[in-house]
Amino acid sequence: MNDLQTSVLYNREIAPGYYRLGLLAPGYPEQAVPGQFVMVQIQSQNDPLLRRPFGIFNVGTLPPLCSGLPERDYVELVYKVVGRGTRLMSALQEGDAVRLLGPLGQGFDCNTTAGPPLLVGGGIGVVPLFMLACNLVKQTQPVRLLMGGRRCDDVLAVTEFERLGVETYVATDDGSLGEQGLVTQVLERKLKKYPTARVYACGPMPMLKAVHDICVRHEVALQVSLEALMACGIGACLGCVVPGRRHRSDQPDYRCTCKQGPVFDARDLSWEVDHD
Ligand SMILES: Cc1cc2nc3c(=O)[nH]c(=O)nc-3n(C[C@H](O)[C@H](O)[C@H](O)COP(=O)(O)OP(=O)(O)OC[C@H]3O[C@@H](n4cnc5c(N)ncnc54)[C@H](O)[C@@H]3O)c2cc1C
Ligand code: FES
């Protein structure tokens, strides 16, 4: 884990209210694993902001700007503007300073080779699945992505996944892209066709609960990436805990999302209690 003072390479609006942010991030291509996250802190006119957590979309290395200079490692984030912090982020320009803490948390276990992988993303939850897909396509083919969103604008990075060779299936609430309906309906169908699949999911909690119930019914393995509210990102504030599988009101069992997650084997969590 590094605490870096770094700078913005680019910050582009890729769909209304969604941005793709590239930051210089020395060491990230070697260190980061799919499913990990970073804490971003920007300074804006003496308005220091709490760090905000974002999943890692991708990492890579750019060629040197000119001969004699080193190559430049970078990390890419994709974010949705929802409040003050992300609004300030959306104004970042090339060269602006940003503090970056990471890579943080536990990522996806990609080493299991059992069964074909099915990735399920809801809205901005698709972000950590891209680096996972980059990793999986090197080990196994085919990799399938089921993506859901309210409208077509909420379905991100389809082209990037397809360029990797990932088979993508899209469902939107209003039918403006892909089939009309919920991504969980697509998952039901795919699990009938691929009954030995292993599922990786990230998205809003109601979607994850539905994915969990379907995976239990089909007896397939599931890893979930959670987006709990986080203040510190390093296990100090306990603001991000979620109930673990043995949780009872008289016998608490909590998991710290930033240290033990954000990716969990779904069997380690309690799905009986409300996580929100
Ligand atoms: C591990 C992790 C990975 C994440 N990855 C991404 C990502 O890749 N892209 C992305 O756009 N967002 C991601 N998020 C959510 C992101 O951290 C929040 O959207 C961001 O912190 C909001 O900051 P803000 O100041 O703009 O909004 P605030 O003003 O702090 O909040 C605005 C609204 O957003 C809600 N909100 C804030 N944080 C969260 C959260 N963690 N989950 C759900 N609702 C929240 C608040 O309850 C409030 O209603 C991730 C969160 C976690 C914990
Ligand atoms: S965010 Fe502080 S302990 Fe997890």
Image: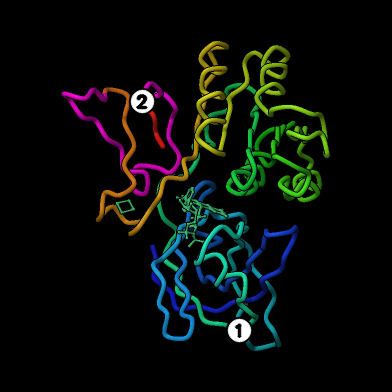
The amino acid beneath tag 2 is: Val
Nearest to N terminus: mark 2 or mark 1:
1
The amino acid beneath tag 1 is: Gly
| Residue beneath the point at 50% across and 66% down | 85
Magenta segment boundaries in residue numbering: 247-272
User: Horizontal and vertical percent for residue 143?
Assistant: 71, 33
Mark 1 element type: loop
Mark 2 element type: loop
Which is in the foreground here, disc 2 or disc 1? 2
User: Horizontal and vertical percent for residue 260?
Assistant: 34, 42
What crowding class fits label 2: few (fewer than 14 Cα within 10 Å), some (14-19), or many (20 or more)?
A: few
- Vertical arrangement, residue 62 with respect to residue 191, above or below: below
Asked if the stretch drawn in magenta spans residue 181, the answer is no
Query: Which quarter of the figure has residue 215?
Result: top right
Residue ID for mark 1: 95
- The alpha-carbon separation of the residues under discs 2 and 1 comes to 45 Å
Residue ID for mark 2: 273
User: Horizontal and vertical percent for residue 273?
Assistant: 36, 25
| Residue beneath the point at 67% across and 62% down | 19
- Quadrant of the snapshot with the N terminus: bottom left
Closer to the camera in the image, 104 or 15: 15
Query: Which quarter of the figure has residue 198?
Result: top right
- Vertical arrangement, residue 225 with respect to residue 8, above or below: above
User: Horizontal and vertical percent for residue 259?
Assistant: 34, 48
Answer left or right for 221 relative to 78: left
| Residue beneath the point at 54% across and 47% down | 34
Q: Is mark 1 within 8 Å of ligand 1?
A: no
State the mark number for residue 122. none
Secondary structure mainly formed by the magenta segment: loop
What crowding class fits label 1: few (fewer than 14 Cα within 10 Å), some (14-19), or many (20 or more)?
A: few
Query: Which quarter of the figure has residue 17?
Result: bottom right
Closer to the camera in the image, 6 or 40: 40
